Image (tube, rainbow, N blue to C red):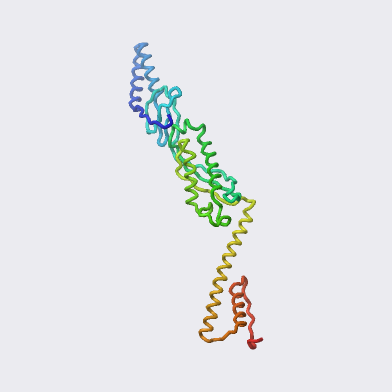
């Protein structure tokens, strides 16, 4: 048998009534000193009391009879079962697991630190009880293994692999979906249902974090410079065209080059430009 089987136990409240009646009859037998009645009532009391179980909400009882699996009780309330059954309690509540930050290599070989949060619960009590030795340790080890595989499947960002469609630092929905699918496949053998999984922490490893930050800053500066130059060229072109259309001034090629150079310096410079006012002729 490789799957969970549900059992319907007897009503425990009816058993409680029988318990009370057996106690009353036992007391009556003691008064009468009727040994047979005392023995029978004593056996009934022990059997009824031994078979009572309480199943709380979102919990279950796994029942064994001399090592053989007989079923699981997931109903809530007071019940009576065979007193010879061995019982093991398993919680069906949703639980969180946050993995430790582990150092792994991304697809491009860069060392990164990553941790994940896993929301899970027991789905199949038979598999939890008998397919794995310690399901809590199994979840921890399989989660770490899934995180290592996930990190090795995607680059950290687009700087190393510009053709990548999914990266760890940008496509969170796709990455979390891949992680959830990987964990669901790994934990299915243990009867664990993956409710949600997501990356909780992601960063470059300390030994390369500073270099990667400088690379990102340099890329941002280059992109900003490109945008500034593009805008400055447009402004210079517009200025020259407007001056020419309105016949304000006519430039030869040398003066046009000089004006373009000056305007580009003013528009693209990092520091504030300090103009020099010419109070003489244009040739001075």
Q: Is residue 94 above or below residue 81?
A: below
Residue 123 on image: x %, y % = 43, 37
- Mark count: 0
Query: Is residue 159 or residue 206 the one in the foreground?
Result: 159
Vertical position of residue 3 compared to residue 185: above or below? above
Q: Residue at the spot x=55%, y=49% of the render?
A: 201
89 and 12: which is toward the camera:
89
The part of the image, by quadrant, that contains residue 16 is top left
Question: What is the x, y in percent for residue 58?
Answer: 41, 37
Residue 50 in the image: above or below residue 183: above
Determine the residue positioned at 58% across, 74% down.
Answer: 267
Q: Position of residue 7 (x, y in %)?
A: 37, 29
Above or below 88: residue 266: below
For the N terminus, the quadrant is: top left
- x 64%, y 88%: residue: 281
| Placement of the C terminus among the 4 image quadrants | bottom right
Identify the residue at the far bottom of this view. 281
Observer-nearest of 92 and 151: 151
Q: Nearer the viewer, residue 165 or 198?
A: 165
Q: Residue at x 52, y 33 (%)?
A: 134
Which quadrant would residue 79 be assigned to in this image? top left
Q: Could you tell whether 190 is left or right of 160 in the image?
A: left
């Amino acid at each position: 048998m490789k799957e969970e089987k549900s059992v319907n136990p007897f009503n425990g409240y009816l058993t409680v009534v029988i318990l009370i009646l057996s106690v009353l009859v036992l007391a009556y037998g003691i008064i009468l000193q009727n040994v047979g009645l005392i023995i029978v009532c004593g056996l009934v009391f022990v059997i009824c009391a031994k078979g009572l179980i309480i199943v709380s909400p979102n919990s279950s009882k796994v029942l064994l009879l001399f090592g053989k699996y007989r079923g699981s009780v997931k109903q809530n309330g007071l019940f009576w079962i065979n007193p010879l059954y061995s019982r093991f309690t398993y919680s069906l509540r949703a639980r969180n697991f946050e993995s430790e930050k582990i150092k792994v290599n991304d697809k491009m070989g860069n060392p990164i630190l990553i941790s994940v949060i896993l929301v899970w619960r027991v789905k199949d009590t038979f598999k939890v009880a008998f397919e794995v030795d310690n399901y809590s340790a199994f979840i921890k080890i399989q989660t770490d293994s899934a995180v290592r595989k996930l990190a090795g499947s995607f680059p950290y960002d687009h700087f190393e692999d510009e053709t990548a469609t999914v990266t760890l630092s940008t496509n969170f929905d796709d990455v979390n979906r891949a992680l959830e699918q990987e964990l669901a496949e790994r934990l299915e053998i243990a009867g664990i249902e993956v409710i949600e999984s997501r990356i909780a922490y992601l960063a470059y490893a300390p030994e390369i974090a500073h270099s990667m930050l400088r690379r990102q800053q340099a890329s941002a500066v280059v992109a900003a410079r490109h945008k500034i130059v593009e805008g400055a060229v447009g402004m210079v072109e517009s200025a020259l065209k407007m001056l020419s259309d309105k016949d304000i001034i006519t430039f030869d090629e040398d003066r046009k080059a000089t004006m373009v150079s000056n305007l580009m310096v003013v528009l693209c410079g990092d520091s504030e430009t300090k103009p020099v006012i010419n109070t003489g002729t244009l040739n001075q």
